[in-house]
Image: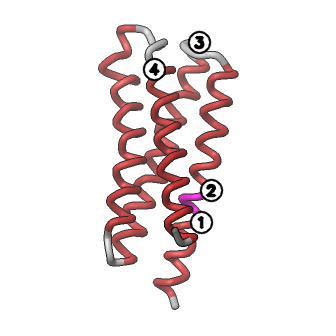
Amino acid sequence: MNAKEGFHNKLKRLIIEYILFGYQILKKFPRDEIFIMTAQCKRAMISVFLNYIEGYARGRKKTMKYLYEVSYGSLHESIGVFLLATHLEYISKDEYLKLFQQKEEIGKMLWKSISGLNDDINN
């Protein structure tokens, strides 16, 4: 396995772990949020994964970069829901901090990928 594939597999694993933990936390949301915050957060978390996977599979660097940027934006959207949930006291600050730490690691890796593609596209 080359370094690129090792990076890709690690990022996929981290995103999946984030989604699984996020789904676990979303079960604590009140029932009346099921079609609002819960559904929106699930869509955002799934978007992180699917756009990353699709971007990785694409051959064109500009398309790959665009999909990674969508993934990065969805990551921030999902953590925004969890931040709001903390203020609404649906989840604990400790739960939010664990999600935030996961988001930070994923975000750094996505941003590294986006930056590398920017360099490739601009050279």
Circle 3 residue: 89
Residue 77 is covered by the magenta coloring = no
Amino acid at the residue labelled 3: Glu
Residue span colored magenta: 108-112
- In this view, 25 is above or below 53: above
- In this view, 90 is above or below 110: above
- Could you tell me residue 68's position as x and y percent? 43, 61
Q: Secondary structure at mark 2?
A: helix
Q: CA distance from mark 2 to mark 3?
A: 28 Å
Most distant residue in the front direction: 1
Q: CA distance from mark 3 to mark 1?
A: 34 Å
Helix, strand or loop for the magenta stretch, by majority: helix
User: Is residue 107 left or right of 77 when viewed as pictured?
Assistant: right
Q: Mark 3 or mark 1: name the one nearer the start of the chain.
A: 3
Tell me which colouring the rendered structure shows: secondary structure
Circle 1 residue: 112
- In this view, 50 is above or below 85: below
Are discs 3 and 1 less than 8 Å apart at CB? no
Q: Mark 4 or mark 2: name the one nearer the start of the chain.
A: 4
Amino acid at the residue labelled 2: Lys
Between label 3 and label 4, give the one nearer the viewer: 4
- In this view, 27 is above or below 122: above
